[in-house]
Image: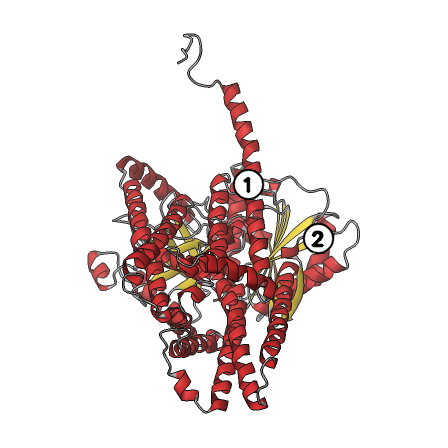
Amino acid sequence: MGTLSEHEPLLLNKADEADYAKKVTKFIPFVQWVIKFIIWVIFVAWGTLIVLYPTKFMQGILESMLMATIGTIFGITGSVFLVFSGPVLLMTFLSFAYLMVSPAEEFHGKKKLKFPTFRLWTFPVLVGGPFGVVSAAELIGIVFFIVYLFWAVAVYTIQNRESISKFNLPFWEESYQMLELSGLRIGSIGLFCLALLFIPITRGSFLLRFIDIPFEVSTRYHVWLGHLTMVIFSVHGLCYSVAWAMQGRLLEEMLQWNDFGIANLPGVISLAAGLLMWVTSFHPVRKQYFELFFYTHQLYVVFFVFMALHAGDFVFSIAAGGIFLFLLDRFLRFCQSRKTVDLLSATCLPCGTVELVISKPKNLQYNALNFVFLQVRELSWLQWHPFSVSSSPLDGKHHMSVLIKVLGGWTKKLKDNISKVSEEPDNELSTQLHPRLTASVEGPYGHASPYHLMYENLILVAGGIGISPFLAILTDIFHRVELSKPCLPKNILVVWAVKRTNELSLFSSVDIESVCPSFADKIKLEMHTYITQETEPPLEDGEVHKSTRRSHFPMKNQNKMSGLAGTANNIWPGIYAVTSTIGFIIFMALTELFYIKPFGITAWWLKGLLFVACMIASIVVFGGLVVVLWHLCERRDLNDAKWMEEDEKSNSVQYNKLRTYPDAYQTTVANLTTANYGRRPDFEEIFHSASERWGGDVDVGVIVCGPSTLESSVAKECRSKNIKRSKNQPFFHFNSHSFEL
């Protein structure tokens, strides 16, 4: 064992520390590249397996592999799960590793590129069709799915014809045999779609965060996959129904529940639940009867449980990976939503908008593009509604705010409740008559990276309450400029279309002067408002922002948001996911060793039920243990007296500064705003003017938040400008921030 010299320092000097930091900084990108490469290899191999699965060659390979696993502890079910669902879980765990080695600071700044860059994700190709605004990357995915479906159906049809032609059957018998075989093959295609269906709605998904697809965008993919999956399963059921009707035993077959092989009745129940969810998910029903859509969508439990009973354990395991990830996320959200959260204040603005300021812990991170799901228990114990965050994470360490437009029954009740509280005197009796609101929060969710900071030139286009996330973006940029944090935006153009002047009161929550006094020297900010239903300013213009009703709810018990779900944490969710997966493997092994084999269980439906039970039990037991430990660590942090004392002082100062609604609306925002009455934005003129002012070969980030018609108009202009673009002209990158369930 060596000895240390008395002259040799025990700690590294500053030069050595700097060298060590440089080595680590250089090593991290290499590790990230390796993880990315492995994930892409797994994804390509998994995709190739699914695409080639209809071929006899691939089926032969899989059959040989599955036969080799007979007699092992997990048997064929374990092999099928490993081949088809294992890659999804493995890519998720690698995504967790990637996020863990990534720097804690979400944005370090990027060098300005010399030339505009073409990006598949931000180039709109299809606009105004059944899919809405579709980027080049999304179009590639849609085309791939269409080609795959035609390819798979064609291959299966040829194979079915070859199989049936070997027997000299009468035409009638050949017809219903062909229908049954086609129904079987189409059902297998539906399973692959089901394997993907639940992944996009896993709100805190490591996989989605790795590829930087936020939940509000991936929801569209869930909608597309949901329509496709239900069409395929409907055709699957229809093929069998027609075949059974041709044989005169439709009712008998539909009520059949076999122990060995496929159980028909659970399949009928699963399909019925799926059809009910599907019918109520179409846009007209979802928009007019949102509660009906929301409540019927809880039938997803019936859908996948009876799917497992219908197909059995080893067939269901093809799609089990995505469902398992969704259940992991759902249990975590359930645990987070049990906690009530303090509302620091509630303000009713004259434009029919409510602002809520929510208490959050210091270590819960979010960015200006995030959103949360909010439940107010005084209004409903079941309804959850998504709202964009309207405050910057740099506004304060202990609170975030959301703006809520009063449009439906739930929001109207919220406004009435707040108005009642604000009208009462501030005393103990009024608190008993109208107790403070009790809220629960899920999230935050959304973009892992703040892409609004990655463009030197920004065009923010909002419609109505769509200005909410842009208020957060603006304050975030001003804070970063003032604090000298990495921030690329230098030129910002805000285009806001509203119906009436009183909606401009939303600007009263942005105090640019106090956030960044010297912003005019560092950022060129232009704000254009378009008041579409008024031809001239009203006489009271300039005073609308003062007409507010405000209620304050002082914190007494430090009830802050929980960080159990969302994108605010990496370590604990990763431990939770890995532990639950290990628990699932353990439960499956115990079930096989102590129940299935000893009692000779052979019924497919029962094995399918046990498979689902092991999934749920592993999450509740093993995952629940991690959640308890996580929660205890949160409580320990919150109960640190010194930490709370210091933070409470900071919180009080920052909160009071933020919520004063100063006259800066009169002196700063108003002076920067050009009001246009009685007309809508002319995006061709707006984009042309921005191009001339901001120079030639530059990237311009365009972010839209508003109605679908507004999105389509902006996307068309971006596409037109990019297609007609010549040298020394900017490239417009289209980004949508609109959220709709």
Q: Splitting the image into 4 quarters, where does residue 435 fall?
A: bottom left
Inter-mark Cα distance, 1 to 2: 29 Å
Q: Is residue 116 left or right of residue 532?
A: right
Kindly indicate whether the residue at mark 2 contacts the one at mark 1 (C-beta within 8 angstroms). Answer: no
Give the residue at the far right of this rendering.
Answer: 727
Q: Position of residue 82 (x, y in %)?
A: 46, 55
Question: Does any portion of residue 388 appear in the rendered image?
Answer: no
Mark 2 belongs to which amino acid? Phe
Q: Work out whether 643 lies above or below 620.
A: above
Q: Work out whether 40 lies above or below 129.
A: above
Mark 1 or mark 2: whose residue is earlier in sequence? 1
Mark 1 belongs to which amino acid? Gln
Q: Splitting the image into 4 quarters, where does residue 162 fall?
A: bottom right
Q: Nearer the viewer, residue 366 or 506?
A: 366
**Which numbered tag is attached to residue 173?**
none
Question: Does any portion of residue 374 appear in the rendered image?
Answer: yes
Say which residue label 1 marks: 32
Q: Within 10 angstroms of label 2, few (less than 14), some, or many (20 or more) residues?
A: many
Give the residue at the far bottom of this rendering.
Answer: 248
- Tell me the quarter of the image containing the N terminus: top left
Which residue is located at x 58 percent, y 40 percent?
A: 109
Say which residue label 2 marks: 731
- SS at mark 1 in the image: helix
Q: Position of residue 407 (x, y in %)?
A: 44, 70
Foreground tag (1 vs 2): 1
- SS at mark 2 in the image: strand
Q: Position of residue 332 (x, y in %)?
A: 36, 55
Q: Is residue 35 left or right of residue 326?
A: right
Which residue is located at x 31 percent, y 62 percent?
A: 596
